[in-house]
Image (cartoon, grey):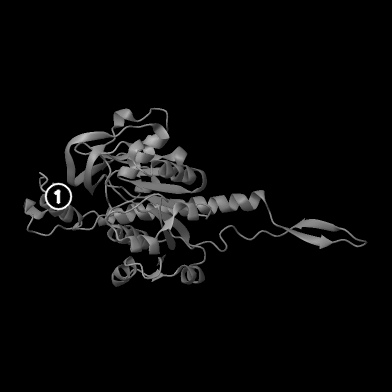
């Protein structure tokens, strides 16, 4: 299915070259009816790369999707050109009253900071609360997953003695979860972080479900059903070369860092890595959007049942009467979504 992105966004030609149909919002609505609207709060330093990575996964699903790029109002990027942010991103205060079906919040290179010292922490908490109240499902990635867990459940993050860095096999703990349909017993995922959240810190009665984890890298994916949220602490959206670029960057900065584990063929940094995790990235995003579509369609049907439209008719001799109108089928006018069944 196609994806709607802002005009002239660098991701558009990159995705089109890969065979993904990229349209404008108006073109998408004319072609496929109402798309799923996703708000992407991108806090990563290289925004152009992250936009492309996440929109690639969204555009490869069975749901027509329209993406709005967003940042907290007080957020300032030190690495992405200000002109790019001003042109393609909208401050959260300008989108908070618009209807969205899903929210994605990315990680951020601020793991060393206590949450309360992040300059936009209060705004991020407001975004998380806004999503909990009005959006069908939210996906929080890496640091954002830790942040949302802290906000909802006061779960702490812990510094690691060394950076977790490489591609690690994750065990599927929630095989019956709709978000993991088709995953099998295990899957590989890139890991790149200096902190972790621990299973022992998860509150027992909060309804948190661990869906995937690893003995080497700990928690990977948690579902928070009460808050309609998924917390992914690793990076299925990464490109094949992302960990290599991070490795080169850190080495050039003089940091003592080993090559990413289980990543380069035969451990040789001179050989290009292969993206073995992409199929599971496509599955996760397809399953997630499929669940959003079901929720939205159910809510629309409930709304129609609760508040049927009426028609005002004149009465002979004066006056008017309200008469219920025939209600169309719930899926009429909805996006044609063929998510997992």
User: In the displayed image of the protein, which residue is found farthest to the right?
Assistant: 317
**Residue appearing at x 84%, y 58% in the figure:** 320
Q: Tell me if 99 is positioned left or right of 308 in this view.
A: left
Label 1: few (<14), some (14–19) or many (≥20) C-alpha neighbours in 10 Å? some
Give the camera-side residue of 327 and 19.
19
Which quadrant would the N terminus be assigned to in this image?
Answer: bottom left
Residue 110: x and y, percent?
28, 43
Q: Is residue 315 above or below residue 191?
A: below
Residue 267: x and y, percent?
7, 51
Give the camera-side residue of 234 and 333.
234
**Residue appearing at x 64%, y 61% in the figure:** 328
Disc 1 target residue: 250
Residue 329: x and y, percent?
61, 59
Q: Tell me if 270 is positioned left or right of 173 in this view.
A: left
**Residue appearing at x 11%, y 50% in the figure:** 251
Question: Is there any visible trace of residue 225 in the rendered image?
Answer: yes
Element marked by disc 1: helix
Residue 75: x and y, percent?
37, 50
Total numbered circles: 1
Question: Is there any visible trace of residue 218 in the rendered image?
Answer: no
């Amino acid at each position: 299915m196609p994806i709607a992105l802002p005009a002239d966004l660098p991701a558009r030609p990159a995705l089109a070259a890969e065979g993904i149909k990229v349209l404008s919002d108006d073109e998408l609505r004319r072609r496929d009816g109402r798309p799923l609207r996703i708000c992407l709060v991108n806090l990563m330093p290289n925004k152009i790369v992250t936009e492309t990575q996440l929109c690639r996964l969204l555009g490869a699903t069975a749901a027509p999707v329209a993406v709005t790029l967003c940042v907290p109002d007080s957020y300032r990027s030190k690495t992405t050109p200000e002109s790019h942010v001003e042109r393609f991103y909208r401050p959260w205060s300008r989108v908070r009253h618009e209807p969205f079906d899903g929210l994605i919040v990315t990680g951020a290179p601020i793991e060393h900071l206590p949450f309360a010292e992040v300059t936009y922490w209060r705004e991020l908490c407001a975004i998380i609360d806004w999503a909990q109240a009005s959006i069908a499902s939210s996906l929080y990635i890496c640091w954002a997953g830790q942040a949302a867990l802290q906000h909802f459940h006061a779960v702490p993050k812990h510094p690691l003695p060394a950076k977790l860095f490489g591609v690690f096999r994750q065990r599927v703990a929630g095989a019956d979860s709709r978000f993991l349909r088709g995953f099998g017993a295990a899957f590989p995922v890139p890991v790149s972080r200096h902190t972790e959240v621990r299973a022992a810190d998860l509150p027992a009665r909060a309804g948190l479900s661990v869906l995937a984890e690893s003995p080497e890298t700990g928690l990977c994916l948690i579902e928070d059903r009460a808050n309609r949220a998924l917390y992914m602490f690793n990076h299925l959206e990464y490109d094949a070369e992302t960990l290599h670029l991070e490795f080169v960057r850190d080495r050039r900065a003089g940091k003592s860092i080993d090559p990413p584990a289980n990543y380069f063929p035969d451990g040789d940094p001179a050989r290009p890595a292969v993206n073995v995790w992409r199929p599971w990235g496509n599955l996760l995003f397809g399953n997630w959007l499929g669940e959003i579509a079901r929720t939205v369609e159910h809510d629309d049907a409930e709304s129609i049942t609760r508040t049927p439209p009426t028609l005002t008719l004149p009465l002979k001799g004066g006056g008017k009467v309200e008469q219920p109108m025939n209600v169309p089928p719930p899926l009429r006018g909805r996006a044609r979504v063929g998510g997992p069944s």
